[in-house]
Amino acid sequence: MLRFTSRALPRATAVALLAAMAACSDNAPPVPATLVASGETQLTGTVGEPIAAPLSVKVTDAKGRNAGGIAVTFTVAEGGGTVSKTIDTTTSAGLASTTWRLGERAGNQRVTATVAGVTGDVSFTAVARAGAPTTITSNGGTGQSVVVGTAALTAPSVIVRDRFTNPVPGVSIIFTVASGGGTIAGSAATTNAAPANSYTSNTQTYS
């Protein structure tokens, strides 16, 4: 039969108390200390379309341990567009993510990730390219009065745009004399790469 002395009982109680305190400490929610990117932060894509890779971040505590159960906020900071989750909770590995659909304007766009109580943010940037060409319109050179057999004073030019009206560079254009005769000096051209001025032009000589 086991007997506990008056000294053994308090010691056992103290050990149990310390064990309980340690268990409570282990089960305490983590306190986030750092937020870093977990993947690429400089991206490219097409306007109005989702970025292929998700935006992912990692949260750790002051001892560098993965911090699970932490809310991460993703915010579209520049260029429009949307994210699939504005708030995502970190996994046991400390990871949170969202997907990003770019806005309609070509150029630079940005999304930030933040955690309450953590200084700074993670910034994801994307260069949004124009989409497929959908329209072609005159950009100058129409309605001119020119002496027969001489070059037009203003070279005929066109501008090509995507479905969001962004100018589209790199599109092949063929100029053709449709009526009245005349010749074209260089009938083939390509829209230029200037984002605000993507057009092509050629000189037409009327006879």
Image: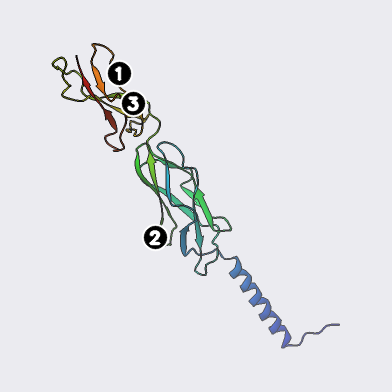
Is residue 53 shown above or below 181?
A: below
User: Mark 2 and mark 3: span between their CA atoms?
Assistant: 48 Å
**What residue did someone put label 1 on?**
176
User: How many other residues sit within 10 Å of disc 3, few (<14), some (14-19) or many (≥20)?
Assistant: some
Residue at image coords 66%, 75%: 19
SS type, badge 1: loop
- Residue depicted at x 28% and y 30%: 199
Tag 3's secondary structure? Answer: strand
Residue to which mark 3 is pinned: 173
| Image: 125 above or below 17 | above
Q: In the rendered view, does 94 fall on the left or right side of 144?
A: right
Asked whether the residues under the numbered discs 2 and 1 touch, taking CB atoms below 8 Å apart as contact, a structural biologist would say no
Left or right: residue 197 versus residue 149 is right
Task: Confirm whether residue 89 shows in the render.
Answer: no
Q: Residue 59 versus residue 107: which sits nearer the camera?
A: 107
Q: Nearer the viewer, mark 2 or mark 3?
A: 3
State left or right for residue 70 relative to residue 192.
Answer: right
Relative to 140, say whether 46 is above or below.
below
Residue 120: which numbered mark, if any?
2
